[in-house]
Amino acid sequence: MTDTIGVGLIGTGYMGKCHALAWTSVKSVFGSGPRPRRIHLAEANIDLARQRADEFGFERATADWRELINNPNVDVVSITTPNAFHAEMAIAALEAGKHVWCEKPMAVGFAEAQRMEAAARASGKVAILGYNYIQNPLIRQMEELIASGAIGTVNHVRVEMDEDFMADPEALFYWKSEASSGYGALDDFAVHPLSLLQVLFGNPTRVFAHQSKPYADRPLEDGSRRLVETFDIASVLFEIDEISGVLTVNRSAWGRKGRIALQIFGSAGSLVYDQERMNELQLYRATGPSTAQGYQTILSAPAHKPYDRFIPAPGHGLGFNDLKVIECHELLQTIGGQKGRVIDFANGLEIERTVHAMAQSHEEAGWVTIG
Amino acid sequence: MTDTIGVGLIGTGYMGKCHALAWTSVKSVFGSGPRPRRIHLAEANIDLARQRADEFGFERATADWRELINNPNVDVVSITTPNAFHAEMAIAALEAGKHVWCEKPMAVGFAEAQRMEAAARASGKVAILGYNYIQNPLIRQMEELIASGAIGTVNHVRVEMDEDFMADPEALFYWKSEASSGYGALDDFAVHPLSLLQVLFGNPTRVFAHQSKPYADRPLEDGSRRLVETFDIASVLFEIDEISGVLTVNRSAWGRKGRIALQIFGSAGSLVYDQERMNELQLYRATGPSTAQGYQTILSAPAHKPYDRFIPAPGHGLGFNDLKVIECHELLQTIGGQKGRVIDFANGLEIERTVHAMAQSHEEAGWVTIG
Amino acid sequence: MTDTIGVGLIGTGYMGKCHALAWTSVKSVFGSGPRPRRIHLAEANIDLARQRADEFGFERATADWRELINNPNVDVVSITTPNAFHAEMAIAALEAGKHVWCEKPMAVGFAEAQRMEAAARASGKVAILGYNYIQNPLIRQMEELIASGAIGTVNHVRVEMDEDFMADPEALFYWKSEASSGYGALDDFAVHPLSLLQVLFGNPTRVFAHQSKPYADRPLEDGSRRLVETFDIASVLFEIDEISGVLTVNRSAWGRKGRIALQIFGSAGSLVYDQERMNELQLYRATGPSTAQGYQTILSAPAHKPYDRFIPAPGHGLGFNDLKVIECHELLQTIGGQKGRVIDFANGLEIERTVHAMAQSHEEAGWVTIG
Amino acid sequence: MTDTIGVGLIGTGYMGKCHALAWTSVKSVFGSGPRPRRIHLAEANIDLARQRADEFGFERATADWRELINNPNVDVVSITTPNAFHAEMAIAALEAGKHVWCEKPMAVGFAEAQRMEAAARASGKVAILGYNYIQNPLIRQMEELIASGAIGTVNHVRVEMDEDFMADPEALFYWKSEASSGYGALDDFAVHPLSLLQVLFGNPTRVFAHQSKPYADRPLEDGSRRLVETFDIASVLFEIDEISGVLTVNRSAWGRKGRIALQIFGSAGSLVYDQERMNELQLYRATGPSTAQGYQTILSAPAHKPYDRFIPAPGHGLGFNDLKVIECHELLQTIGGQKGRVIDFANGLEIERTVHAMAQSHEEAGWVTIG
């Protein structure tokens, strides 16, 4: 009989449900590893906590997350609350001897992120961040293609992340337009492309960013308007050693729903990817007859591990939630002592460092060198 | 506390795992409905049965499927064994008072399918078939667009289903090339497009089919070659009342991995869909200025129910396995006495009837009228 | 100094202008071959004839096409009038010792087409039909890929041709809905896909067709409605020796503007093409690692002859009218005694034969074997 | 009878032929305007000059371009020689009282461009640059959509131009890698996107650029290697008043053949375009039901003027060379005293100014404000 691992879940919104689904199905998908036992669920409102515990199959519900953290049957804690709570909860969980799976971004400020990383280091526990896009088997395939030299030496990269949930200028002002929420698109979105860059190439060594506001103000409920304090758009030139790159993010981009577009150019070919078609990868190789060159559209398939754990047939398609299941499996592997494909707090801190350097470069209107 | 429903699973291959995953996560995804309790799992080999029961979280394992069917704690039985076993198992389960969720195709012969349908009728239990493609929220959206008149009166339909798992002429001869397995692509593939047609328009009223063999023979392990007895390709002209249509299926179609392509033409617009891009729907409406007409690419979104139960953000993408979760939910709804979106044995029998009429039309080289 | 060739043009509508543009630029594009001298232009209305002669750079204008045909300076005659005039004009031109470049379809009835072919044979002159889609360098590339075995032995083909110029059910009844204009989509559209099939594989040896009317009647100017006599939709099963195929044509297909879609499946790969993206060709080859297979999108390029005569850079794109320039060049090559890539009257007659066999199969509701 | 205009052509390479084809067919395509009379052709080598004159239908050939410029029958001169000759030839032609159609980029240095602009102003003649991409009917359609408010107020723009003719690191060093040829991709490519931006929004008001070299050196014929002096890649942040933007150009981008990709975001929608699919425009409008939103793919059509002058049917496709014919027509309109859609030397100078400001910002590693 399989070993079990006790799970606690704090927060039950968008990502909370996504974590719950991952804990629910990871064992059935992968077959191996411990069986997650859904022990304790925390949600600010106790009635909602109970309802979600029932839906998600958790044994106990609480409105006090500290109770969950102190539950001796809980081995690992999913933290999916608003960003402002990440540091306090993660540090408390680590200090209580729990492994931590915390959603991105790491924290609101860099100092907080540093404290989180220090706590993780001190604890000896596994502490990772929810950067699920790196888990796409096709991103792994890109990594392998690059490592195998399929496109030669990479020299230029472009990354875009765009959605339109803030594109309506007449949508009511809410907390994402307040300065207290952070810079705007830079920490809301840029961290995702940075997680992909980190996995594929490492962290930027030099950045130059510019942020902009598509809308100066937004309406309040009383009909008056309030000035927008955050930047919905950010554009960044960067370097990762010899690689030059451009990163652009826009959360007011009408028409884009979940676009994370990568263009990677090398000395022998190129790779193109868009998260909105997450089961397709474009590969160009500068080989073969001149009459028959062109981008190949590779559909995700069992050959792209661990797609095969979900479906034995090619071209049938994984979904967004499946990426979280893979992330969960990698976390369990790491907890089990194996090398998992995860962004731990140390690596996550580098992403935060980069974001803050970008904001600084915007302020200074000049390049900022990192590290 | 939620009610539970006892689940039995027979077969743990491709579709067996898919059912297991659906039973595992349906409650967490939908929140409502009874909680499936994974009671009993049957697999021909007892060791494999035990391993899968552990992986999939079933309480008991057996190599004797009749034991599972007689387990009083089992309320509903998933049948995912090879087609030849469907009739015997489904009828036994129904007679034992269980609800049945049987994978497609219904049975090897039409008489068997008829007996299954009769057993379902006699039992008063819910008996449905695993036609998961109809569960795609975008297929439901197509249905609503058609019903709302968005493309006017439909007059012409084209459907294609193509994969390439039998495209290699040097792959070893196996059971799918034996006459005992059925006609070939006609019953292996055509049933899926027919399930989509049934949901959208009803069953064909007249068919003319032609089948062909891309490869006359295939190699055996000893190096000799054996004549192929089934047809990997079938092309069909059909009518559904006033609608004319073409259906083509090919399981030797190099490059196609999970293509189910629909083209639906109406008096005011058209719809285009391909399962390989299952999160996209193309809609053309003959309205607006002549300078700005063209197909709209609609990405799946929370507005397309029940996508919202999986992800609250648009354009993030469902996967193939999510369709089975929706099917599972529709089954539970039906068991609970509500109208579910399912293909029950009565409707499934109509699909079988159509397939056999197609084969007959091939034999007779003429149109066959149905019903 | 280059030799010249005297050109006459009958008809100045859609295709008349297209021929004029081809005659105007063919020498500049290809560099080689005789210089076309635009001698004589005929158009039913003399004022329009004069205007077009001025615009298109022809030396003389006439309302009497026989005058043009008898002009001793005219060596080759472009016939771009309505189909009903093709036979009379082409035969007269051939008998007058002129080469003939006649637009498709060849003629209204098969007997007329036969007389045209006989006249061409008797004349010893070059007589070709305007099947310009075969001139696309990417179609030529498909031909070369197939001939070189890049996709193995072809076993299945699908062809579609769809436009929406007759898709509006409330558009006024006009001559294309009258029986005197022919069958409908079968002779209006099917001849184009047949020209492509002929070049790539040869002529169908057996056909089964079904035609349908999306709209039973259409409005007249006085507000009453008239029954439609032609079929806007036709669907055909066919065989070309060992190849099975499906051809569907629809001139009431909302959203389709110039779709001619080809899917060609072979034992080692497949090819996919759509005229709406006439500068792209999809090639799938069943080779290489399982992780990196997929359709390659080949953009038209100088390597695809004679693209290089138009543009020295790849991916910049040819247009529809450029195909006519290539056709004109192939005609001049043929007149000059070289083997041109053209559909002459003998080959065109085979296309007509196939179309009439399709109509016959519809009538008889059974297969019709050809030749 | 139509008036004529005497044409001189200097240079007969890639763009020289493109001009020749435009002069040849512009009258036949547009019907209106003067008939171009191909008078005089100049090419460095007299034999080649004679051959090209014969091919392109010019009356006289010369190896001395000054002879052409002094030919009293020549009214307008096409200048398609290497960039280094543009200034001298254009100024001489203008001073000789000729209209000038000069290929881009304007000149090698900014001072030269200024002298050209001054000469044009002083001459009172029409002097335009060959920025043909602005002539695409779909670019005109974008302009009209933006002007009509279809996508609201534009707030963010991304432009990319990529080809791969310098992507091979082992291709021999040639003049484009020499500093004397200019900055590299910045003046080779960036001018094209800038011409599109100018037409759609005006000139950048502030720029920050970074250039990079994918390959430090390239081989010489003797097997040794020479350091590359120009930048094949440039990335630019810019502002056009309230619009923020990113422009990236790369002439070493494996797989890209003629990509000029535009993404334009506004407060009510967005537009997406790629020159590699020059007959398609993507339009997103934030209107209608939430279930049926998505990018519309608009195919070029007669409704997009002057597509209708080439082809009366939609979706059949213009080619790259057709853009030059439209440009030629706009030039003739301008010469005729009407407002043509052209980039004259004054506007072209602004493009040059922007490019030099970009290079300066790279040097200074800071923003450069323009104008």
Image: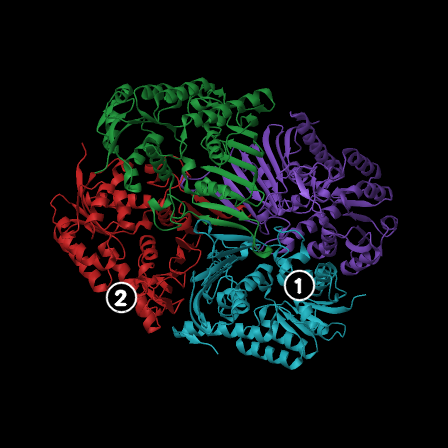
Chain colours: A red, B green, C purple, D cyan
Q: Which chain carries label 1?
A: D
Q: Distance between the residues labelled 1 and 2?
A: 59 Å
Question: What residue is shown at x 38% (from left), y 28% (from top)?
Answer: B128
Q: Name the residue under label 2.
A: A180
Q: In which quarter of the image is the N terminus of chain B?
A: top left
Q: Residue C124 carries which label?
A: none
Identify residue type, mark 1.
His
Q: Name the residue under label 1.
A: D19
Residue C336 visible somewhere in the drawing? no
Determine whether label 1 and label 2 are within 8 Å by CB: no
Against D205, is A196 above or below? above
Against C9, is D74 above or below? below
B296 left or right, relative to B33: right
* Residue found farthest to the bottom: D122
Local secondary structure at mark 2? helix
Identify residue type, mark 2.
Ser
Against C291, is D103 above or below? below
Residue D129, percent from left and from top: 61, 70
Residue A209, percent from left and from top: 36, 67
Q: Nearer the viewer, residue A367 or A289?
A: A367
| Figure quadrant of residue B92 | top left
Residue C36 visible somewhere in the drawing? yes
